[in-house]
Image (spheres, rainbow, N blue to C red):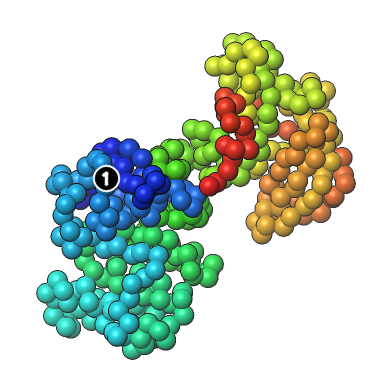
Amino acid sequence: MVTIKLINVTKRYGDIVAIKNLSITIHDGEYVCVLGPTGSGKTTLLKLIAGVVRPDKGEIYIDGRLVNNIPPYERNIAYLPQYYALFPHLTALENVAFGPLSRGLSIEEAYKISMQMLEMTRLAWRAKSFPHELSGGMQQRLALARALASGARILLLDEPLGALDARLRVELRYNLRKIAKENNLTTIHVTHDQEEAMIVADRMIVLRNGEVQQEGTPLQVYNEPRNIFIAHFVGEANFFEGFIADVDQYGSWVQLRNGFILRTNDTNRSVGERVVIMAREEKSRILKAIKKREEINLLPGTIESISFLGTFISHTILLDNGDKANSKVPTINAVGKFRVGERVYLQVKPEDLRVYPYPPHGLYRELEVI
């Protein structure tokens, strides 16, 4: 059972606290993606597990064994850093074969495994090339192939697909997960790409300032964001500031700027409480006209801009109260339907709204991804 456990781990670099009192468990065979803004501690977390750096406080266990003072080469870990660390004097094939040969495999077996990994990463045709003869994206794929061929039971990946073109990145993300699952590898995959994480992860861990903000399945993190930062960082959302005007057994009425009102299903608030309302962009509908006068949560405004996003079209709406909101509509349903300058209504159902306490340092500070 290859499990990883961190208990109250802290890591400092001078006055900077990169990881703060962090406790997490990665289960055997689990594929975990770690997300967070720059400086959130993602890379430091991998380095701590790999043994490249040691914690200032706390304990790290691998398979129940305390490894704080165990060197990296005794941890049975394949660590793929952002900066590849390839052997410049070895060919691509020799770089990948280094791990299998170190495990005592014959040259034939090592080269067979290495060619399979090079084929998977579309580098077999450059097997005899040296690292300096490869592009940055090719070097990243080579480092990935070497990590996969190492035979380690734990795979630590730091932005493994970051330097690749979009089409290859999409293809390799599926291959990565497939290989990890077929070989029962315990994998921690650091990425800034939320879409990538949601596609490949069994579980997501979101860091900010060295602390875990939320962990759970991609569906849980997306649909049930614990705080404003998570709602903003994972997915696209609209945020409205207001205060609770009334509460009953079914929910609450929130007054926004200039008298606009939204009905929510949240019953855990108090009248007069200052709050922030979140609505996912894809659940924010645009209506040209009101069909029923008794419809609720209708916010009038004007379409300010329209952006084509491929499968979606994004509409930015300047609401009459001065707020702005975005609505993402599937392209097939939106082409030519709306135009800039058109008067519309934005509508969000009460069940699609989440209510958060107003942050003490302000909404925009909470939305910062630094």
Q: Nearer the viewer, residue 1 or 15?
A: 15
Residue 140 in sight in this render: yes
In the foreground, 118 or 69: 69
In the rendered picture of this protein, how many numbered marks are placed on residues?
A: 1
Whether residue 217 sits left or right of residue 26 in the image: it is: right
Tell which residue pokes out farthest to the front in this image: 14
Q: Secondary structure at mark 1?
A: loop
Q: Residue furthest bottom?
A: 128
**Apparent side of residue 58 relative to residue 235 in the rendered image (left or right):** left
Residue 246 in the image: above or below residue 122: above
Q: Nearer the viewer, residue 46 or 98?
A: 46
Of 267 and 332, nearer the camera is 267
Identify the image quadrant of residue 299: top right
Kindly identify the amino acid type of the residue bearing the numbered disc 1: Asp
Q: Residue at x 27, y 55 (%)?
A: 53
Q: Is residue 33 left or right of residue 282?
A: left
> What residue is at 66 percent from the left and 59 percent from the top?
310
Can I make out residue 182 in this image? Answer: no
- Which residue has dot 1 on it? 56
Q: Is residue 196 left or right of residue 202?
A: right
Please state the horizontal and vertical placement of residue 54, each as a whole percent of the image: 25, 51
Instruction: State the residue at coordinates (46%, 43%).
Output: 208
Image position of 262 with respect to 314: above or below: above
Q: Position of residue 224 (x, y in %)?
A: 50, 34
Whether 51 is drawn above or below 144: the answer is above
Q: Residue at x 62, y 40 (%)?
A: 237
Task: Count neighbours of disc 1 (C-alpha within 10 A) and say few if under 14, some if 14 to 19, many if 20 or more.
Answer: few
Residue 182 pos. (x, y %): 28, 60
Residue 189 horizontal/vertical position (percent): 37, 55
